[in-house]
Image (tube, rainbow, N blue to C red):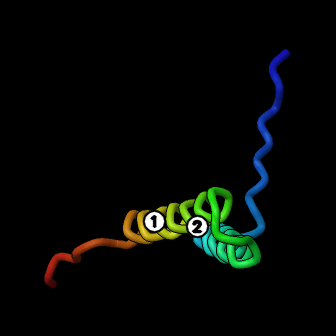
Amino acid sequence: MTKKRNRTRPARSLQERLNKFTRDARAAASRLPAGAERHALLQKARDGEAAAEFERLLSSPGPQDPK
């Protein structure tokens, strides 16, 4: 017997989740002293911002034909 797929949708959009992840990573990094762990959190925040930008560009309608 095959397992049924969970078809529920996330409560928030991908853009909202990426923005929250970025805010949380930056907030956590601000509480740490300078070092490798802080640098890693800041890198994750930058990666989250880049992912949010890619998602925004990919979900935009793009150039429209003149009517």
**Residue neighbourhood size for the residue with mark 2, other residues' Cα within 10 Å, grouped as few (<14), some (14–19), many (≥20):** some
Q: Quadrant of the N terminus?
A: top right
- What residue is pinned by disc 1? 50
User: Looking at this rendering, what residue extends furthest in the bottom direction?
Assistant: 67
At mark 2, the secondary structure is: helix
- Residue 24 is left or right of residue 47, and the answer is right
Count of labels in the image: 2
Residue drawn at point x = 38 percent, y = 69 percent: 57
Looking at the rendering, which quadrant does residue 27 occupy?
bottom right
Residue plotted at (62% across, 71% down): 22
| Lateral position of residue 7 relative to residue 22, left or right | right
Mark 2 residue type:
Leu
Q: Nearer the viewer, mark 2 or mark 1?
A: 2
Q: Which residue is pictured at 74% across the width and 61% down the height?
A: 10
Counting residues from the start of the chain, the first of labels 2 and 1 encountered is 2
Question: Distance of mark 2 from mark 1, alpha carbons?
Answer: 12 Å
Specify the label residue 42 is tagged with.
2
Q: Could you tell me residue 6's position as x and y percent? A: 80, 42
Q: Residues within 10 Å of mark 1 (few under 14, many from 20)?
A: few
Q: Position of residue 11 (x, y in %)?
A: 77, 67
> Does 7 sit above or below residue 53?
above
Q: Is residue 23 left or right of residue 51?
A: right
Give the image location of residue 30, x and y in percent.
Answer: 69, 78
